[in-house]
Amino acid sequence: MEINFLAILVAALATLPIGFIWYNPKVFGSVWMKETGMTEEKAKGANMIKIFSLTILFSFMIAFVLQTMVIHQFGALGMVGGGAMTPKPSYDAFMADYGHAYRTFKHGMLHGFIAGLFLALPIVGINALFERKSWKYILINGGYFIICLTIMGGIICAWE
């Protein structure tokens, strides 16, 4: 199974419009600013090129790992053995039978949601607890990652 770098990039870029909506003042932006202590002055003084560049890089890294969670066929080569260039005949047979199984947007969303709920939310929550942040902060940021991973999972899984 080859890595689809275009799907990974599109999934990574999907985090930006989700963030624009999620952190909009009319959605959760005002509450998030209050919970983080962010002010308009601090926000205006930020290096947005650096922030968005690193956001895309980090999102790409997340999407790269997420593909192994949402595409079940990634584990087939490791299960049957052989190299990527010289897979065993059982790998070819498996891919012929199951190469397109569960490769839907809906299925990817399910696994992305599970990754968000059971991986991203606890990571955000643990950091927030030690930083003495509120439950609002945890739910806003954790919710953002649950939504992002859900959409990212759908894109990555469906794009063959």
Image (tube, rainbow, N blue to C red):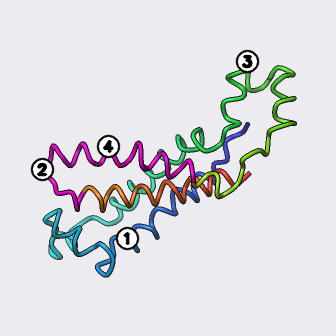
Q: Going by the picture, which residue comes out furthest to the bottom?
A: 26
- Disc 4 residue type? Ile
Looking at marks 3 and 1 on the same chain, the residue that comes earlier in the sequence is marked by: 1
The residue singled out by tag 4 in the image is 123
Residue shown at 40% from the left, 74% from the top: 21
How far separated are the C-alphas under marks 3 and 2?
47 Å
Q: Earlier in the sequence, mark 1 or mark 4?
A: 1
Query: Which range is magenta?
Result: 110-137
Q: Determine crowd level at label 4: few under 14, some 14-19, many 20+ residues with C-alpha closer than 10 A.
A: some
Q: Earlier in the sequence, mark 2 or mark 1?
A: 1
* Tag 3 secondary structure: loop
Q: Which of marks 2 and 4 is nearer the N terminus?
A: 4
Give the total number of marks visible in the rendering.
4
Residue in view at x 82 percent, y 35 percent: 95
> Which residue carries the number 2 mark?
132
Q: Name the residue under label 1.
A: 22
Q: Quadrant of residue 49?
A: bottom left
Can you identify the residue that label 3 sits on? Answer: 81
- Please, what secondary structure does the residue beneath circle 1 have? helix
